[in-house]
Amino acid sequence: MAKTIIFGHKNPDTDAICSAIGYADLKQKLGMDAEPVRLGAVSKETQYALDYFEVKAPALMEEVEPGTDVILVDHNEFQQSVANIKDARITEVVDHHRISNFETSEPLYFRAEPVGCTATILNKMYKENGIAVPKQIAGLLLSAIISDSLLLKSPTCTQEDVDAAHELAEIAGVDLHTYGLEMLKAGADLGDKSISELLTMDAKEFSMGGAKVEIAQVNAVDTEQIYALQTEIEAEIANLIKEKELDLFLFVVTDILNNDSEVLAVGNGKSKVEAAFNVDLDHRSRALLKGVVSRKKQIVTALTEAYEK
Amino acid sequence: MAKTIIFGHKNPDTDAICSAIGYADLKQKLGMDAEPVRLGAVSKETQYALDYFEVKAPALMEEVEPGTDVILVDHNEFQQSVANIKDARITEVVDHHRISNFETSEPLYFRAEPVGCTATILNKMYKENGIAVPKQIAGLLLSAIISDSLLLKSPTCTQEDVDAAHELAEIAGVDLHTYGLEMLKAGADLGDKSISELLTMDAKEFSMGGAKVEIAQVNAVDTEQIYALQTEIEAEIANLIKEKELDLFLFVVTDILNNDSEVLAVGNGKSKVEAAFNVDLDHRSRALLKGVVSRKKQIVTALTEAYEK
């Protein structure tokens, strides 16, 4: 049997990497020759989790071998996947995002659930298959939930995520809140990041009513510290807009202690940001979005609506 | 709580209607205010099943009320759904087809599995929720499996479908083969159908490499009896091609006793049919496809590949 490759989205976050590792473990136990890979650099947050639970990062994959069987976790939109995804045969998807720009020519196993994290679905799949979650994998799945839910505070976080997080913390043998805050803080340490890294480390591109929109998000303990570099940030965003022919680039700096986001909008679509969030961008093209922490649930949905109006 | 409307695809077959009824029953038992509807006429085959198990056909729905919560069963491609599907809020999909031309702005519950029939997945969902399948619903789900698998003979039929069919026949209190053949024969009785009905009763439109392809399938006991009307059939297909701006119309007459299909190809895409199935269309633009009974697994996949080459 040929090997099946499992991966999360480009610019991988903790869920993208840990769910690939977790699902590969489950699939191996079910008899599949499965290997997790990653489509980009490991973030500090993810590295903290991998180090804590003593798991090696999956190998980096640039392109998929044509004809390979692949399983996508934590994404389905092709522009967020490996560049030559159309050359692969997608046999499964396990995800918790909206569905868009995804198609296959054959039936497949596609499981999307409106929960806060892919790892929550995987925790359920271990149970459905009567297989115990190993301690290290439990730690990684827990880390994914903490990351996606900003320690269970994001509006995307459902009761299922909360329950899964507590179960997994127990198996992993950690205190959910102590471990979670340390992991988030490790990820919010942006001191050594270049401007370019800040704009790409967790960036996703979306198609909205025909427009090309890129949304980059970083977690921070002090948002002002990042915006001290606004001039340089804007110059780099201008390059990205030109290079990728974007209509809008939204840079979202999320304050993990206060659970707000300070956003910077660049491009022709600035008015869409104002309409979507009912705010005025200030003279620096910035706005504070109170209580907004979720790109998926609070930003993409509102912006898509503004673009499709 | 507002009502959720559940429906299968346009030109409904037995799975589209019976899975809508079945899933509405399960959802009601789980506390949802759910109502099954249908997007088109009830076929003779489906009517046979409804009459046998004494269930009323769901109401016909022409358009969905904007803003309504809807659940799609047995389809996901928007061109196969209600015309104004984009005005509805899709909360769930349960399906067994390829995924294409489907998108949402919000996460949802999407469950597709590569099995032969939606009803097979529903049988599993009853079990997962610890709810017994009622006798009448078991009869309808069984009918859907028999219909989609041509009495377990189609290559789309998996072991899961076979197992589900036997379980459901037991609950429904019928002999699988005796009941199944009677139901299929009721559906293959085309004596009273107009040409237009033959071409629309089970027709689906597909987008293949930019081309618009419509594939209509009818089951028959005697394929020659249908092709006695070929001149009239071709004239009507020519109208459909003009009206819908199709690149290809493929009319598939499936012999339910011999498990072959005699196809008629009309439109610019005739060469794609020859390439896809490695056959020559004869002077009547027809070809016998030996062992081909499944539109999904044997026709759509091969044609899509020919179009995308």
Image: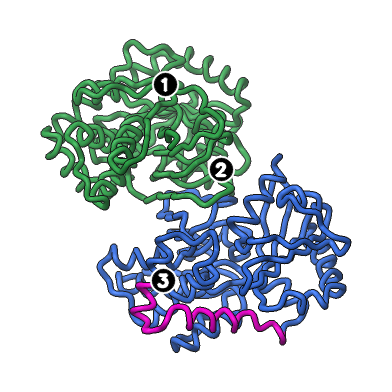
Chain colours: A green, B blue
Quarter of the C terminus of chain B within the rendering = top right
For label 2, the residue is A101
Q: Amino acid at mark 2?
A: Asn
Q: Are marks 1 and 2 on the same chain?
A: yes
**In which chain is the residue bearing label 2?**
A
Q: Which residues are magenta?
A: B166-192
Disc number placed over residue A174 in the picture, else none:
none
| Left/right of residue A178 with respect to residue B97 in the rendered view | left
Tags 3 and 1 on a common chain: no
Which residue is drawn at the image coordinates 19% and 23% (left, top)? A52
Q: Quadrant of residue B9?
A: bottom right
Q: Residue at x 49, y 58 (%)?
A: B96
Which residue has dot 3 on it? B165
Tell me, yes or no, if residue A270 can be seen here: no
Residue at 58 percent across and 72 percent down: it is B12
Residue denoted by label 1: A60
Which element type, helix, strand or loop, lies under badge 2? loop
Mark 1 to mark 2: distance in Å? 24 Å
